[in-house]
Amino acid sequence: MEEFGKLIVQNGCLDMIASLHDQYLDFICMEKYLFSLSNKQDSYVMINGANVTDTVMENYLTEIAFGLLSVVGTTGKIPVIRCPRGGAPEMVARKLNQLIAEHPKLTSRTNNQQRPLLVILDRNMDLITPIQHSSTYQALIDDLLEHHANRVEFTTKAEGSSKNRAQVKKFDLDADLDPFYSKHKFQPFPEAIEENGAELQDVTVREQAIRSKTVGGGGGGAGAGDEQAPPSEEEGGAASDLASAVDSLPKLLERKKQLEMHTSILQAVMNEVAARDVPQFFELESALASGQYKNDALKAKSEVMALATDPSKGNVEDKIRLVIVFCLATTASGSHITEVAEGMKNALESRGSTVDGKNNSGHGGHGLLTKEDRVKLEKGLKAIDYLQKLRSMKMIPNIADQDDYGGSKGANNSDLLSGFMARATNQATGLLAKATEKVSSMLGKIVKHHSTRVVENLCEMKPGTEDDEYLYLDPKVRGDVDVKVLRTMTRAPCREVITFVIGGGCYAEYQNLQMIADERRTVTYGSTELVSPCEFLSQLGKLS
């Protein structure tokens, strides 16, 4: 911007410019509290690739810092920056700290707005969240359907077609403008199904009531030659009510259209969930990740092997993701992990799978893998091999060694399940009945993931946690800030948090972070890029 100003003066163009604005365009905002940086594909590979030179890495981290500067410039607030010491997070944090400190427009602001907390994290600190299966509506859309930049796409059978021709449907989702999506995107999938049916039924009843009023609203009037009597007060009120009802009809129809769109999306997700038996993978992965097999690695191995070698359960990527969670979440030996991976490979190569990939579920029989599935299997085995190497060198954490992982949120699982089953019994038709049979196990099993626990510790300034260990940078203060000194002072409570993950983020992590958001605290989530579980799996396969 400064260089541009100099060129304007040097070339005598000042009289041609009415105003000049600094724009921050290095990030993309998908929702009010969700963003990613622009043009940062394969970010995990870039950060962790063995063939990436120091110069390329330095330039890449600088681009990330400039992207975060765009975010800070857009908010107009100078954050306090926290990050783990060492590695990419510290390098980006220090670059960003310097960029903000040297930015005249940002540092010249003297407002007394409460400053946000910017937490910069490394994807390697939690590789399970972007890989494991999810249970919430928005995360399942991103996992099971084609979903990019808020546009969802899937294939269905054309209605009324005897030849079962495929029909491609595309919908644009906007959580900030769509009331149903905004309210239910973080809910367990079965609950979203139930609420969609209830709301659609309510809207349909209201629509029919309005239309019946308009049809029967003419009434009997005087003849053409009769003198028109002035309307009574009661008739005038009825006419006013009718006019109000008619005026509300377009808005009601728009809401009905949105709900019918979600019905189509829910049906598409349900088809994938049912064909791939996603709840079984979700159940077992959740049990592994929450430490239920912490003291029984052999039982974990047995159950993972059984599911990973069952040709009627899941597609190739589902099985690979399960084995990766087993690798990252348990104390199983390297030989046991290799044995499970080999067992999965042999089962797939000899018996195939009844599910051949996204939006192509249930082709109706066992058999040899398709060429595409063989490529996925090869990449998946490379990903498992890569993670085993990191695990053996202790370059990534194993959550089985963490005492604080887990802890369910909300009501008791059995209470949630019994309530859902009771309601489904009364409406045992259609999508809800199908959900009762297939996905009821997805209810009530949300635990705090690594990033959520870290951010909560930093916000609440808990001693003996990351608040003591993480780097503390303040662009308004020269040099590092000593957290031990801060402990002797009164710090303002954190009301606004921006959590940023280097190496790729996911909707499951975004949703999990909202567990610590409330009316007093907002949590914004960002990452170098948003990736689906299969996209992240593909990146892992490039690093072996």
Image (spheres, grey):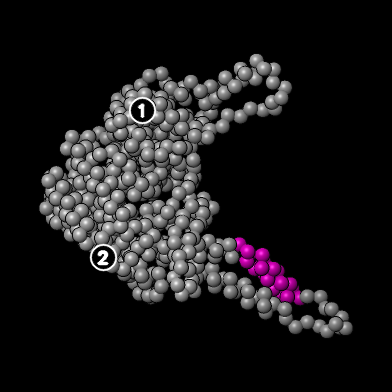
Q: In the rendered structure, which amino acid carries the disc numbered 1?
A: Met
Q: Nearer the viewer, residue 321 or 249?
A: 321
Residue 403: which quarter of the image? top left
Indicate which disc residue 366 carries. Answer: 2
Q: Residue furthest top?
A: 10
Secondary structure type for disc 1: helix
Q: Nearer the viewer, residue 296 or 9?
A: 9
Classify 402 as above or below 259. Answer: above
Residue 239: give x, y in percent of width and height: 71, 72
Q: Nearer the viewer, residue 306 or 175?
A: 306
Q: Which residue appears at 42% of the width and 37% of the height?
A: 40
Magenta stretch prevailing secondary structure: helix
Q: Which residue is mark 1?
A: 57
Disc nearer the start of the sequence (1/2): 1
Range drawn in magenta = 232-251
Q: Which residue appears at 33% of the width and 66% of the height?
A: 363
Left or right: where 224 falls relative to 395: right
- Say few, some or many: other residues with alpha carbon within 10 Å of mark 2 (under 14 / 14 to 19 / 20 or more): some
Left or right: where 172 falls relative to 52: right
